[in-house]
Amino acid sequence: MAACHGGDLNALMELLAPEVTLWNDGGGIVTAARRPLHGPDHVARWLLGVMGKPVSAGIRLEPAVVNGELSVVGMIGDDLVGALTYDIHDGRIENIRFQVNPNKLNGIQTEGGTDGPTLNTKGTR
């Protein structure tokens, strides 16, 4: 999260597996990548580009658990604006699923009880 917020391309690329893929779902409502992104360079540059936009300036990133998976959620105030789940392979992030579709985010409920939010999105995919 620090590499992403800090704009450190090299640090972010070191966290990503060589075969990393990012899928994004904006539902045609929120701007999102239309096709999967492949490789650490493309994925890192896209993530830093998103975080560098003025609309992203107020986003607070928090660790979370979504459907039992390690996640990062984006919050503006108390509003959830994005949920990112990922897989770790050999110590690096391999698959990233980035949900920003507000219709699907509306189905996420905080369950609580952990250091970060625990979220359940059952029935929102």
Image (cartoon, rainbow, N blue to C red):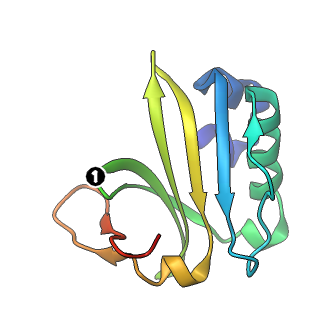
For the question of whether residue 41 can be seen, the reply is yes
Identify which residue is drawn at 56% across, 37% down: 95
Q: Nearer the viewer, residue 33 or 48?
A: 33
Question: Is 71 situated above or below 103?
Answer: above
For the question of whether residue 1 can be seen, the reply is no
Whether residue 59 sits left or right of residue 37 in the image: it is left
Amino acid under label 1? Gly
Q: Quadrant of residue 2?
A: top right
Q: Quadrant of residue 21?
A: top right
Identify which residue is drawn at 76% across, 41% down: 37
Residue 58 location (% of width, % of height): 67, 71
Question: Is 77 situated above or below 72?
Answer: below
Q: Quadrant of residue 8?
A: top right
Residue 24 location (% of width, % of height): 67, 57
The quadrant of the rendering that contains the N terminus is top right
Disc 1 residue crowd, few under 14, some 14–19, many 20+, Cα 10 Å: few
Q: Nearer the viewer, residue 83 or 57?
A: 83
Residue 6 location (% of width, % of height): 70, 43
SS category of the residue bearing label 1: loop
Task: Read off the residue under disc 1.
Answer: 68
Residue 63 location (% of width, % of height): 41, 52
Whether residue 37 sits left or right of residue 115 in the image: it is right
Identify which residue is drawn at 59% across, 26% down: 15
